[in-house]
Structure formats: structure tokens, C-alpha cells
Amino acid sequence: MGYTQQTDPETTSKAIGREASVSPKHCREVCKMLKGMKVEQARKYLQGVVELKTPVPYSRYKKYLSPKPKVGPARYPVKAAKAILEVVESARSNAEYKGLDADNMKVKWASAHRGRITPGHMPRAFGRSTPWNEQTTNIEIILEEVERSS
């Protein structure tokens, strides 16, 4: 499995997190908010989510969500934000390694896809069991260098 987008290696940096033990639904909503942000802004945003200060507005799976002030139906997906922050940090360090200006980059592409499902079960009464599978998520981040306006 590779990347879903073709990019110019001279101006972009990529990172992928495979099979993170996080909900794909939460990761999808967080990735949606990151697109177009500068790297430092994205890092601050994710840190705010982890510290329960910045809510993430949900566009799907929001039927029973309570509204947050000035945001609407939203949540604080802490585990997803931590996993995505790791991938953003990895993409940023990849940019530094390639010799790109890591401070002058923006999130060109952020996506989350379902990963492999780890089968499991939960014991029930009378010797029975119920499937209790663990979902994993593949997180993909592509950073692009922003042209400086002089």
C-alpha cells in the first residue's frame, strides 16, 4: 500500500502512519480540519485538541453530538489527534531531512483510511462470546512548501 496522491518530490514531504489503533471516523474529521493549514498552525491545533481546548467540528456521525460554542456539533478526539500529530511531526522531519524549509510548509493532503481489523471477542454469559474487533487506521499526511511572497 502506498500513497494516494502523486506529488512533486522537490517541493513536498510525505509521511504515513500505518495501522494506528485509533477510530477511522475520528481521524477522518481531524484530517478534514488540517487541510490547508501551515505546519506550525496544525501542530498548535492538534495540541489544543489533546488539551481539550479546541473542539473538532464533525460533519458526519454527528446525530447525538452536543454543540460547542461557535463551532456546532463537535468533539475532542484526543487519541486521534495524538496519532495524527505524530505523523505531522514525521512529515516535518522528513522535510528537514530533504533540505526543505520545514517552517514554511502547509498541509496539502491529510487523509485517514480504515486499516486492518484485529479480530477479538468478548466473553458473554452461558459460555458464549460476541465479536469485539479492534479497528485500525492508516493516516497519510503530505506537506507542500509555500512560495514566499517577496
Image (cartoon, rainbow, N blue to C red):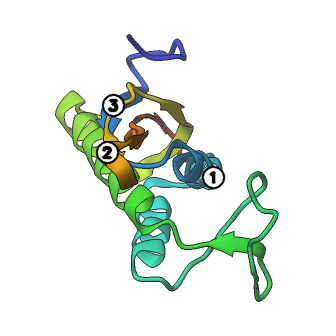
**Label 3 or label 2, whichever comes before in sequence order:** 3
Residue 42 in picture, x, y percent from top left? 48, 60
- Alpha carbons under labels 2 and 1: distance apart: 39 Å
Q: Amino acid at mark 1?
A: Glu
Residue 61 located left or right of residue 27:
right
Residue beneath disc 1: 29
| Disc marking residue 127 | 2
Q: Residue at (38%, 25%) from the top-left corner?
A: 116
Q: Residues within 10 Å of mark 1 (few under 14, many from 20)?
A: many
Q: Residue at (31%, 45%) from the top-left corner?
A: 127
The quarter holding residue 95 reads top left
- Alpha carbons under labels 1 and 3: distance apart: 25 Å
**Label 1 or label 3, whichever comes before in sequence order:** 1
Q: Amino acid at mark 3?
A: Pro
Which secondary structure lies at badge 3? loop
Kindly report which numbered mark, 1 or 3, lies closer to the viewer in this rendering: 3
Residue beneath disc 3: 119
Q: Nearer the viewer, residue 72 or 43?
A: 72
Q: Amino acid at mark 2?
A: Gly
Question: From what the image shows, is residue 55 above or below residue 63?
Answer: below
- Alpha carbons under labels 3 and 2: distance apart: 19 Å
Which secondary structure lies at badge 2? helix
Residue 15 in picture, x, y percent from top left? 33, 32
Kindly report which numbered mark, 2 or 1, lies closer to the viewer in this rendering: 2
- Is residue 13 in view from this perspective? yes
Q: Residues within 10 Å of mark 2 (few under 14, many from 20)?
A: few
